[in-house]
Amino acid sequence: MADGPVVALAGGVGGAKLAEGLQAILGERLTVVVNTADDTERHGLLVCADHDTVMYTLAGLENSEFGWGLAGGVLLLLTIFGQRVFPLAGGSAAGIGVLYAARGVGAGLGPIALRWIVGQQPQRLRRTIGPAYFMVGVFYIALAAAPSLWIAAICVLFAHFGGAVLWVFSTVLLQMEVPDRFRGRVFATELALVTLMSSASSYWTGRQLDRAGWSPRTLAFALGAMFCVPGVLWLIIQSGWKEETLNSEVSTLR
């Protein structure tokens, strides 16, 4: 890659994650041009959704769902893998960049591909969330045994394919099914829980690396296994889910 400035076009979650990976490689050489076609006005305020997504992602402040808050530790782990396990070209920046770029590609493809396959009916979205947790867990467990950077990147891509699915689908379900008068409080509570879980996950991962002496591969296996726990819980809840009762209760609240 040339040493001059690089311009990237970005929009949405996938573009933001790709920009994040490029930023790790290029630093200040990167300029991101963000989509403005989806800007809208709400209650007299200009909402620039893609600008916010890209800026928060590059600042490390992006949101995700509560169980996906475990990704706080995972994102720290990607940096450690790129730095210690798979340094590229004698340095850590390129390895980190490859893993974050793989994360961006997976995050961009996941919701688009799965929505095309399963549609957007609430029942199907709910049934997809549980397996998405297992997809994240299985591929992070696979990352623990990855023999090369490129195999590791494939594992990260598919893990975040599943992660983006559970993130986007669960957000869509909240928007579709939470009554208008409760929605702000529900999303505020969700954000608080995600932030708490992400912080706890990052702290635990850093502590295990620095004080307990765990290797990055051991931590990848442990975090992958942890992702299966909310998946199991979701499937148990889903098995007792009564769609007709839920739809009736939501209609009454509205």
Image: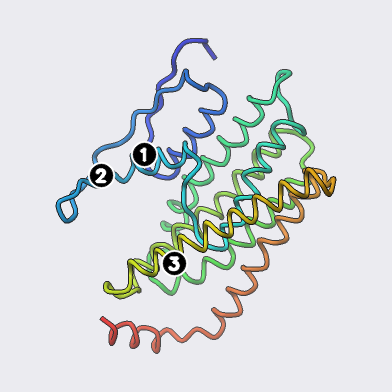
Count of marks, rendered view: 3
Task: Point out the image quarter for the C terminus.
Answer: bottom left
Quarter holding residue 147: top right
Mark 2 crowd level (few <14, some 14–19, many ≥20, 10 Å Cα): few
Disc 1 and disc 2 in contact, CB within 8 angstroms: yes
- Asked which secondary structure carries label 2, the reply is loop
Identified by mark 2, the residue type is Asp
Q: Residue furthest left?
A: 44
> Left or right of 216: which side holds 235?
left
Q: Position of residue 74 (x, y in %)?
A: 65, 48
Q: CA distance from mark 3 to mark 2?
A: 26 Å
Amino acid type assigned to the residue bearing label 1 in the image = Gly
Disc 3 residue type (three-letter): Thr
| Residue 145 shows in this picture | no
Q: Secondary structure at mark 1?
A: loop
**231 and 189: which is toward the camera:** 189
Vertical placement of residue 86 versus 183, above or below: above
Q: Mark on residue 11? A: 1
The residue under label 2 is 38
Give how far across and how far down residue 120 sits, in percent: 38, 65
> Based on the displayed image, in which of its 4 quarters is residue 239 positioned?
bottom right
- Can residue 30 be seen? yes
Depth-wise, is mark 3 or mark 2 nearer the camera?
A: 3
Whether label 3 touches label 2, CB < 8 Å: no
Residue at the farthest top position: 3
Q: Kindly state the secondary structure of the residue where label 3 is placed.
A: helix
Quadrant housing the N terminus: top right
